[in-house]
Image (cartoon, coloured by chain):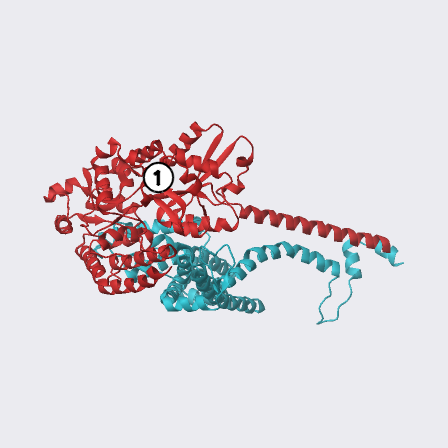
Chain colours: A cyan, B red
Amino acid sequence: MTVETSSTLSPATRRAATRPAWPAGTRKRRSPSGNRKKLAFILPAAIFLALFSFYPMVQLLRMSVSTVNSSTLNSAWDFVGLANFAKGVQQGDLGIAFGNTAIFVVVVTVLGLLGGLVAAILLAASTRMSAFVLGLMVFIWALPPVVNGSVWKFLLGDTGLINAMLGGVGLTQHAVPFLYDEHFALMSVAIVNSWAVIPFNALVFRAAILGIPAETFEAARIDGANRWQEIRHMIVPAVRPTTLVLTVLTVVYAFRSFDFIYVMTYGGPGTATNTLPFLSYLQAFVRYDFGLGAATAVISVLLVLVLAFIYARSIRSEEAH
Amino acid sequence: MKLIGHRSSNRGGRRGAILAAGAVLAASALALTGCTPTSSGSSNNSSSDSGGDKTITVWHYFSDPNQVKVMTDYKDLFEKNNDGVTVENVYVPYDQLNSKLISAVGAKTGPDVVVFNGADASTLALGGALAPMDDQWNSFADKGQFPDSVVHKLDGKTYAVQGYVNLLGLWYNADILDEIGVTPPKTMDELNAALKKAVDAGHGGITLSGLPQSQGEWQAYPWLSSTGFSYDNPDAGKLEQAFDMIKSWTDSGALTRQAVTWDQTVPFQTFAAGDVAFAENGNWQIGTAKSTAKFNYGVVPLPVGSEGKVYLGGEGEGIGAFSKNPDLAWKYLEETYYSPEGQLIALNDVGSLPARTDAASDTSISSDPLLAAFATTIAENGASYPADAVPPASVADQQLAVGQVWSAVIGGQTAPADAATKLVTQLQPLLEKK
């Protein structure tokens, strides 16, 4: 009988009819074959992650506790415990790089978020001009950092456009040492990095702003709200969850920034713009002390992991709301 | 029905397995595609194994058009003299060449021929990227034409030989010197006086590289050694004296502090623009000067006195440790870099000075005032690069340490006395390392 009945039903109805009624509050049990199928689909990504994320991470950890240089890179690595970490601290570069990284991250995060929000508010209206500017921003965002950095190195030179403009309007008599003064150099590279992250932040903020119902704005205007009040009391609260997520993403982006420093200052003058990722590069690929470079990289990874944890929690909290 | 149900379940499982297998294959293919190097190494080169058609890959870091022309001319020369042979020149950025070569060792691959910064010979040999070439070198009939300073050895084994020598000289803008009424300087006092006059007349004084890495160290050494500093016995007082002089240049405006962001190419372009009196730069810029400078110019030896040293640099050429065709690679080196004809190609294209005694005595060098100035420097102030006192395992550390301090002094980050003390402290353990 069951066979007869089921054969007359459509496949969807049949599935619904045969689906067991689960008591409220209990989880559905999946069939083993369904689970296997799902696992099979996860497998490629898992293999990819294991090969290109997990394995390199394990190697990095191994390297950080071993003596690895150009002559031992391709042979057995001698275990030295935390000696590489101690060496990094002892040489004194780590503390300077940590301080530079902290300043760098703060500047990039604050400017990147503020710039992104301002740009998103200005570009929220769907006009031809905003579409054009958005397109331009995507172009800037997609530019390789090496190209971006080279252009900015040229613009910030003594005879570059920025100094020419400052001199032209009478703000300065001498060229501003954007890239070769120890204080200016770090700020200049951080500001250029912020400039590069603004388009991404603006696009995400704009999506959040467009999610606010138009009726809400209309009601506010009827009540006499001006533009500033709309921003202060409607847009800013509405984009708060987005801001949290973007803050974590921008901090991580700033934290691992390497390309702009490599192109614009090479860590100079002296060691004034050495950040943790750049220091790690110098140790591993210029001095060929791969163990020391790996130890610095592990410290960076640990700091980024803390941020990733905060990110995961903020996402979960946002989803719960 | 049970059977049907079972079959259907099986089919679903099989379909899932097929899909999963497909997905795994696709992912593997993508991953492998991602792993495929863009520049071919000898192990990936199927043509080298395919009977008559033979290919050798040559890795280099040249981007300057004149230097690239040397590579193309060598390719044409070798292919013309060897039927069926193809030379594949592969450009790898300077900063990436050593690490790519050392990484390639792990995968037992790499190029047939490597053209690299001669100072890095020991780093590459220690990393296993170069094959010892004692057999080929010892049986080379013209071996006696090459001075010992261009043969790179480690633990008694020969790993590379330089086909030519590159070094620094003092380029001058003759029009500016005429205007300020000075002759090309022969001493440091004359240079300092000329710099002051150039700045007073509204011109730039001198351009050089202050980049905090090996290029900065290469440019710093003549000035540092001019006060008697040497790696044999590092003396903070002599170093401070040299740093004081550099600081006086940046303070007066004779040397822009912007030099800390310049590699060796930018300062010469700045000099070639015509408003700077001097440039510390190399013989490899002769081609650029001819094509760019719209003023009268010349070269004199760097006025670093009898104690001053100028590195005899240039590119080392060696055979890759995992070359599939080392004999053909050696033949390429023999017929291009190490032959009189090949060395004259580098001389004509770039202005590189031949390492061979017979080629170096060519009349085109003695009759050319620019090349003659470099030849004089080789005889009077030429020094091994890197300095003999620096142990092979410490070369990279020493170059970075000096480059960073040099950059910090030019950028005004560190005072000369502090810079000298810091550098000597850093150098002492490096120079002791065996």
Please give left or right for residue B175 compared with residue B432 in the image: left
User: For the point 49% across and 29% down, which residue is it?
Assistant: B84
Residue on which disc 1 sits: B163
Question: Residue type at mark 1?
Answer: Gly
Q: Position of residue B27 (x, y in %)?
A: 61, 50
Front one among B210 and B187:
B187
- Total marks shown come to 1
Question: Would you say A140 lies left or right of B208 here?
Answer: right
> Picture coordinates of residue A52 (x, y %)?
55, 55
**B142 w.r.t. A196: above or below:** above
The chain under label 1 reads: B
Above/below status of A274 relative to B265: below
Name which residue lies at 22% across and 34% down: B366
Taking B342 as reference, is A263 above or below it?
A: below
**Residue B87 placement: quadrant:** top left
Residue A134 appears in the figure: no
Q: Residue at x 69, y 50 (%)?
A: B19
Dividing the picture into quarters, in which one does residue B370 lie?
Answer: top left
Q: Toward the viewer: A233 or A116?
A: A116
The answer, for residue B169, to whether it is visible in the render is yes
Q: Nearer the viewer, residue A56 or A155?
A: A56
Q: Residue furthest left?
A: B181
